[in-house]
């Protein structure tokens, strides 16, 4: 068999679906830096009709629930659905790498999860400080739309705000 035939056959094999999934997984794992920037991840690709509890059930089925201490799935209240992204904080650097490997590339309802480092806020303390005074924590907001704190996989009360919270405003469509 000639070299050009081998190369053509290899490229044909890479076109099959399984090879595509493997290639995408390898590409995403290349995104893991040699120095881990923190413990907070943003995972894209969750079904839009899912909310935080759905994500928690899935994470639990994957054996990861005890690895996280924070979860927040932003929601579009006008449309009554999530944006398909979820923020996680892992309990340690080792756990964040484990979460990345378990979640990245998973398929859920025809969508592939894509894991990225959260770029604006890293770590549990910073997440608590960011969200405790957000309007999303107002008493008028349902508990399952708020960021969740977890200890050993169980819900933990969020620390109280340090200032008066305003009720969230819904923006008109298209703004």
Image (spheres, rainbow, N blue to C red):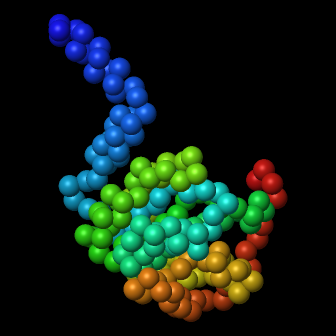
Q: Is residue 122 visible?
A: no
Q: Is residue 30 above or below residue 102?
A: above
Residue 100: quadrant of the picture: bottom left
Residue 50: quadrant of the picture: bottom right
Q: Residue furthest front?
A: 1
Q: Residue furthest right?
A: 172
Q: Is residue 68 above or below residue 23?
A: below
In the foreground, 171 or 2: 2
| Residue at point 66%, 89% (across, down) | 164
| Residue at point 39%, 40% (across, down) | 21
Residue 58 drawn at (x, y percent):
50, 67
| Residue at point 40%, 29% (across, down) | 16
Residue 75 drawn at (x, y percent):
66, 65
Q: Is residue 71 visible?
A: yes
Residue 52 drawn at (x, y percent):
58, 71
Quarter that holds the N terminus: top left
| Residue at point 49%, 50% (across, down) | 107
């Amino acid at each position: 068999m000639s070299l050009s035939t081998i190369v053509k056959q290899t490229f044909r094999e890479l076109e099959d679906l399984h090879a595509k999934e493997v290639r995408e997984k390898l590409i995403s794992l290349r995104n893991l830096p040699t120095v881990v920037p923190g413990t907070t991840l943003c995972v894209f690709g969750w079904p839009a009709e899912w909310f935080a509890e759905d994500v928690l059930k899935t994470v639990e089925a994957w054996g990861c629930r005890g690895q996280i201490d924070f979860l927040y799935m932003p929601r579009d209240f006008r449309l009554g659905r999530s944006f398909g992204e979820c923020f996680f904080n892992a309990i340690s650097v080792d756990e964040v790498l484990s979460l990345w490997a378990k979640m990245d590339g998973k398929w859920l309802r025809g969508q592939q999860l894509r894991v990225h480092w959260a770029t604006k806020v890293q770590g549990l303390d910073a997440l608590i400080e960011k969200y405790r005074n957000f309007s999303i924590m107002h008493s008028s907001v349902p508990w399952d739309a708020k960021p969740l704190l977890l200890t050993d996989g169980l819900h933990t009360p969020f620390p109280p705000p340090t200032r008066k919270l305003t009720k969230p405003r819904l923006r008109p469509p298209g703004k």
